[in-house]
Image: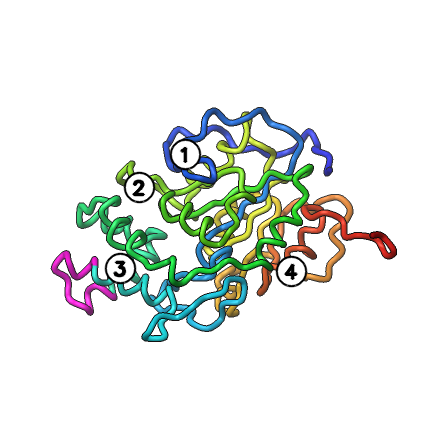
Amino acid sequence: MPSESHKERHLSPSPLSAALVTNNDGTPRGTPPPLDDKLIVLFDIDNTLCAFSIYPNGEARADEWRNVLLVADSKEAGIAELMKDKIRAYFRKLGLTEEEAAHLHHEYYKTYGLAIRGLVRHHKVDPLDYDKHCDQALPLETVLKVDPRLQQLLRDIDREKCHVWALTNAYVNHAVRVLKLLGISEFFEGIVSCDYGAGDFSCKPEAEFFQESVEAVSSPPPPLSRLYFVDDSALNIRGANALGWGHCVLFDEAGAEENRLGGLDKMPLDEDKEGPAKEAARVSVISDLEELRHVWREVFKAPPTNGSS
């Protein structure tokens, strides 16, 4: 277990209610447990654990999915296309043309991190109604399947050294549904999601959301050097890195996000990570979640030695 110096950075308490914190089944979670010496591992869900998302330009990653088995619908469209269709239909329901829907979808995603936040701010949309007609209307049961390889990766995280959480910009209903369908709910102690019920809520990559996420796992919050975070969005990784999160990994399966990291110092996958931590945390970039075993060696159980049974 890494030692903590007297210079260890922490986040100060957040004055905002930015995030919804639940157990892995979506039930309310009580007061955060006392701080211990474990590492905190946080996984994004959509397009990371569950490899689907909508790019900021509205285009879907259609055939680069490796970590989840996907079954196409009758039109050979993946779930990202289905989600895009649901969102665009919701925009049109507000009286917008197809062109306006496409433009605002892109602009709201780029500006606010989520299309729904732009709809709340500019169109007075009820986030829970949006969730009902978009996320909850997706036929996930016919698309998502259990991935034994992903299950094994999560199973191999050393629970004697780590707490494992899901950290998502979706609403909790969607998060619970996806984790259950992927067969991985049991591997997560809790979920930090966007609080759609709060109306104008915050989300990744905003500092308020990251701050409440850290406060959710223990009281007082853990040192930032103990935070391990993987996400498919360069903007989210940049946001966490800027706050001092110690071990940020960009999951860039299709090779389209790394250039959005800007000037962040990227850590080569083959670099020796032992020894004292650098003053400025660096970001690793991976294209397969299995690479976490290499960049986060300290998170996983030691492999069996030769000759062991």
Horizontal and vertical percent position of residue 161? 68, 38
Task: List the residue tagged with mark 3.
Answer: 87
Horizontal and vertical percent position of residue 102? 25, 66
- Lower sequence index among marks 4 and 2: 2
Secondary structure at badge 1 equals loop
- Lower sequence index among marks 1 and 4: 1
* Inter-mark Cα distance, 2 to 1: 15 Å
- Magenta span: helix, strand or loop, mainly? helix
Using the rendered view, name the quadrant where residue 37 is placed: top right
- Lower sequence index among marks 3 and 1: 1
Q: Which residues are magenta?
A: 90-102
Vertical order, 292 against 218 (above or below)? below
Image mark for residue 27: 1
Q: Amino acid at mark 3?
A: Ile
- Lower sequence index among marks 3 and 4: 3
- Point out the frontmost of discs 3 and 1: 1
Secondary structure at badge 4 equals helix
* Inter-mark Cα distance, 4 to 2: 33 Å
Secondary structure at badge 2 equals helix
Image mark for residue 196: 2
Task: Tell which residue pokes out farthest to the left in this image.
Answer: 95
Q: Name the one closer to the observer, 138 or 125.
A: 138
Mark 4 touches mark 2? (CB < 8 Å)? no
- Lower sequence index among marks 3 and 2: 3
* Inter-mark Cα distance, 3 to 1: 27 Å
Q: Amino acid at mark 4?
A: Glu
Task: List the residue tagged with mark 4.
Answer: 291
Using the rendered view, name the quadrant where residue 90 is placed: bottom left
Residue drawn 73% across the image and 37% down it = 1
- Side of 178 where 300 appears, left or right: right
* Inter-mark Cα distance, 3 to 4: 33 Å
